[in-house]
Image: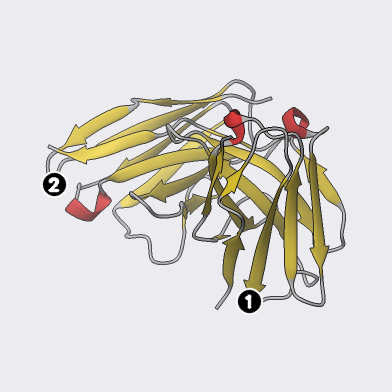
């Protein structure tokens, strides 16, 4: 069964960078699909942030393009989110999810708070 | 970006009642996807390619639409259907989600 699990620091200070990890089990991230980061803000708005494909190519939401990087470690079947220069507006639950057009498997989410 | 507008934002239905919710796109899309989210849980893919039910989704659910206008229908409301439903498109990048329709039991 495909499972995704996010992990991260929980709390980040403004202006710092956040780094999150998504560990995938039950499917190789190099086999197929795109591997996405999606966040949900307080108030429940969902925002697609970007993906890294099975081949290693990336695509980002233009609203984040200058701050975001998605990378991977194929040996550990993990992919990562880095978001630079965070503000309180980046406070959200961050999900990793599988899919290119639709998102068929999601992690349980990790809550990130940006606060000094 | 393609803005998805869902209506109504909140609705309530009695058990056994037919339910219909709408998702309108600012630009035409090829397909619409729907997700169900319950409190403190991740969204679940519910309907894909506009009208196909994801595995495990009860047959009382259906999806339809084309172009800019899509809908999700429940033929007969059951208690377990109380949740928030989001539409999503990826015809054009960036992928976008609607703001959700919260369905409650009356």
* Picture disc at residue B20: none
Q: Which residue is mark 2?
A: B16
Let me know if residue B32 appears in the view.
Answer: no
Q: Residue at x 45, y 34 (%)?
A: A42
Tell which subunit mark 2 falls on. B
> Residue B24 versus residue B64: which sits nearer the camera?
B24
Splitting the image into 4 quarters, where does residue A77 fall? Answer: bottom right
Q: Which residue is mark 1?
A: A25
Tell which subunit mark 1 falls on. A
Residue B14, given in percent of the width and then of the height, sits at 12, 40
Residue B87, given in percent of the width and then of the height, sits at 49, 38
Q: Is residue B84 above or below residue A72?
A: above
Q: Please, what secondary structure does the residue beneath circle 2 have?
A: loop
Q: Residue furthest top?
A: B26
> Residue A85 versus residue B95: which sits nearer the camera?
A85
Q: Residues within 10 Å of mark 2 (few under 14, many from 20)?
A: few
Going by the image, does A30 lie left or right of B21?
right
- Looking at the rendered structure, the number of numbered marks drawn on it comes to 2
Q: Residue at x 50, y 32 (%)?
A: B98
The image's colour scheme reads: secondary structure
Residue A13, given in percent of the width and then of the height, sits at 64, 38
Going by the image, does B104 lie left or right of B21?
left
Q: Residue at x 64, y 41 (%)?
A: A48
Residue B28, given in percent of the width and then of the height, sits at 63, 27
Tell me whether the residue at label 2 lies in contact with that at label 1, contact meaning CB atoms closer than 8 angstroms. no
For the N terminus of chain B, the image quarter is: top right
Q: Residue furthest front?
A: A116
> Residue A63 versus residue B51: which sits nearer the camera?
A63
């Amino acid at each position: 069964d495909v499972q995704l699990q996010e992990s991260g620091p929980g709390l980040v200070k403004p202006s710092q960078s956040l780094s999150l990890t998504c560990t995938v089990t039950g499917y190789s991230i190099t086999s197929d699909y795109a591997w996405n980061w999606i966040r949900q803000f307080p108030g429940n708005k969902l925002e697609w942030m970007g993906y890294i494909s099975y081949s290693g190519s990336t695509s980002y939401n233009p609203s984040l393009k200058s701050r975001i990087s998605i990378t991977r470690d194929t040996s550990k079947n993990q992919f990562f989110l880095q978001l630079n220069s965070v503000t309180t507006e980046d406070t959200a639950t961050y999900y990793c999810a599988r899919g290119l057009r639709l998102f068929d498997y999601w992690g349980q989410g990790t809550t990130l708070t940006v606060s000094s | 970006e393609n803005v998805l507008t869902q209506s109504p934002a909140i609705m309530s239905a009695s058990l056994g009642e037919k339910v219909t919710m709408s998702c309108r796109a600012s630009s035409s899309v090829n397909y619409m996807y729907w997700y169900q989210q319950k409190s403190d849980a991740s969204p679940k893919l519910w309907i894909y390619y506009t009208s196909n039910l994801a595995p495990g989704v009860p047959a009382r659910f259906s999806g339809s639409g084309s172009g800019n206008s899509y809908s999700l229908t429940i033929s007969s409301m059951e208690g377990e259907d109380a949740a928030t439903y989001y539409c999503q498109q990826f015809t054009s990048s960036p992928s976008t989600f609607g703001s959700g329709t919260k369905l409650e039991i009356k």
